[in-house]
Amino acid sequence: MGIEEKLPSGILLTTVEQVVGFVRKTSMWPATFGLACCAIEMMSAGGPRYDIARFGMERFSATPRQADLMIVAGRVSQKMAPVLRTIYDQMSEPKWVIAMGVCASSGGMFNNYAIVQGVDHIVPVDIYLPGCPPRPEMLLDAVLKLHDKVQNTKLGAHREREIEELDRRRMRMLPLVEQTGGAAQ
Amino acid sequence: MLEWLNPVKGFGVTFHTMFKKVPTVEYPEVKAPTMPRFHGRHQLNRWPDGLEKCIGCELCAWACPADAIYVEGGDNTEEDRFSPGERYGRVYQINYLRCILCGLCIEACPTRALTMTNEYELADDSRESLIFTKEQLLAPLLEGMEAPPHAMRLGETEEDYYRLGSQDADAAARADERNSEAVQ
């Protein structure tokens, strides 16, 4: 049924969403946001041994205007937070964020007043990558998981519906530890 | 003399590199094994009969420099026995967005219930899914193991289990020695 069966062999059909997803994921340029030790591992991932260029990230962009992906590598101090937000705002749409390492993801072991407790307080994060610091393979794994996500992102009205569905699911989510409060105990 | 050759010599480097061994890892297709003692994801171990080794003492949570571990102990009863001895870990959670994989919890664990695996692919897209609960951390049931709760099968008291553990460790150490000798 449909047009697929009438086509001669060798012609592949796909959806616009899949094509756009493929194009987006295979040429994603990261903006460097190295802040601490995770940046060393990020540099290592860019070197010849791990070679992030295999995944279409040909260079780390030094200007946010030409970047699609911000890899926040390291702990974000309160003083750095507005800078990070500015860089994110300067990036052109569509843009994605990887929180690399526990400090960027949640504050990590630095549970104090100087460190932002997770960059998701400032920018929307697509992939959280634990590890202190994560090895380059872990970063590549995070990048591949992000690629998967980008490939399956919907467009236009479908995207709006997807966002609504995600919101609904989030509202229904239950906490991991049941907290009944003092009166019930 | 032969200065006109210099521009050609430059290409020699390029040509030579084509025959060199490529150092790039083929990560997603070929996963190179980590060092055997690499600090990866945690695992909650079991005794050979399937009972849990964790006794809910919270020493791991106290040792944790990042406050990533949350433990709530529970009492074993004769009907509901999860571990040999009095107590077991009723709730066990590790927040991988805090955990720095330092291994201090492993050193603190008195029953070797908590160890680390070499698994490192942990990235995910929400904070909630990176808080691992007890079900995710528990070791899989091997042959001869039965999921708790059930009675103690390898001894009368918990002491028998703990002595068994040291025998296990001795046997493992001897096996390691034999292996290393065989390798040499």
Image (cartoon, helix red, strand yellow):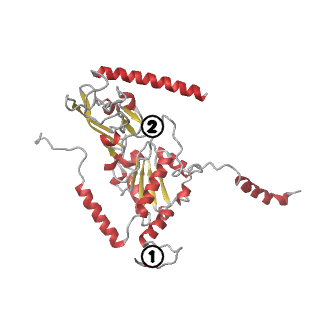
The residue that appears at 58% across and 50% down in the rendered structure is A47
Which type of secondary structure does the marked residue at label 2 adopt? loop
Q: Give the chain of mark 2.
A: B
Identify the image quadrant of residue B133: top left
Instruction: Give the labeled residue for mark 1.
Output: A4
Q: Nearer the viewer, residue A93 or A126?
A: A126
The residue that appears at 42% across and 46% down in the rendered structure is A101
Q: Position of residue A6 (x, y in %)?
A: 46, 79
Question: B151 left or right of B35?
Answer: left
Looking at the picture, does residue A12 appear above or below residue A49?
A: below
Instruction: Give the labeled residue for mark 2.
Output: B39
The reply to whether dot 1 and dot 2 touch (C-beta < 8 Å) is no
Question: Mark 1 vs mark 2: same chain?
Answer: no
Label 1: few (<14), some (14–19) or many (≥20) C-alpha neighbours in 10 Å:
few
Q: How many marks?
A: 2
Q: Position of residue A144 (x, y in %)?
A: 46, 55
Identify the image quadrant of residue B169: top left
Looking at the picture, does residue B163 appear above or below residue A172?
A: above
Alpha-carbon distance for marks 1 and 2? 50 Å
The three-letter code of the residue at mark 1 reads Glu
Is any atom of residue A126 visible in this view?
yes
Mark 1 or 2, closer to the camera: 1
Q: Nearer the viewer, residue B45 or B7?
A: B45
Q: Position of residue A167 (x, y in %)?
A: 27, 61
The three-letter code of the residue at mark 2 reads His
Looking at the picture, does residue B124 appear above or below residue A150?
A: above
The residue sitting at the left extreme is A183
Q: Where, quadrant-wise, is the N terminus of chain A in this rendering?
A: bottom left
The residue that appears at 32% across and 37% down in the rendered structure is B67
Q: Position of residue A176 (x, y in %)?
A: 25, 46
